[in-house]
Image: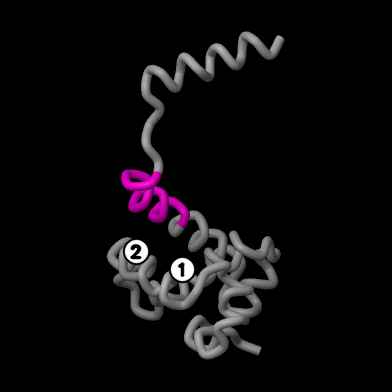
Amino acid sequence: MVESSMELKSDPQMFFRHTRMTVPIFNQLLEMMRPSLSKKNHGALVPEERLAITLRYLATGDQVLSIAMAYRVGQSTVYNIIKETCNAIFDILAPDFLRPPEREDWINICHGFWTSF
């Protein structure tokens, strides 16, 4: 059976099981990611499918082979999609959600390291 994010969206519980997020949150993330996930190649998977494949991999731990079979794409395609999408997620979300450690943070880390011995 071919799964698509459009089919999964019609069943919110199944969608959540596959992505670990609700449809509205997925759509919000998709809109943030769309420019980075869009490919100019004719026949390339649309951003929605690329994001769904990556989230399924991250959320379920499914084997790449089973995801490739479910979406009817090659294993190497799934590997590339996961890598590209994870990099894009980091590039887009890190500035807002991952602040770099400050001096005080490094001091606390260092102190914790030396006192653990």
Write down the residue under mark 2. 33
- At 34% from the left and 79% from the top, the residue drawn is 42
The percent coordinates of residue 3 (x first, y second) are: 58, 84
The answer to whether the residues at label 2 and label 1 have Cβ atoms under 8 Å apart is yes
Q: Residue flagged by tag 2: what amino acid is it?
A: Met
The percent coordinates of residue 41 (x first, y second) are: 34, 73
- At 41% from the left and 76% from the top, the residue drawn is 24
The percent coordinates of residue 104 (x first, y second) are: 41, 18
Disc assigned to residue 23: none
Magenta span contains residue 62: no
Q: Is residue 18 above or below residue 111?
A: below
- At 39% from the left and 72% from the top, the residue drawn is 47
Write down the residue under mark 1. 51
* Mark 2, other Cα within 10 Å: few <14 / some 14–19 / many ≥20: many
For label 2, the SS is: helix
The percent coordinates of residue 9 (x first, y second) are: 50, 85
Q: Which residues are the magenta region?
A: 86-97
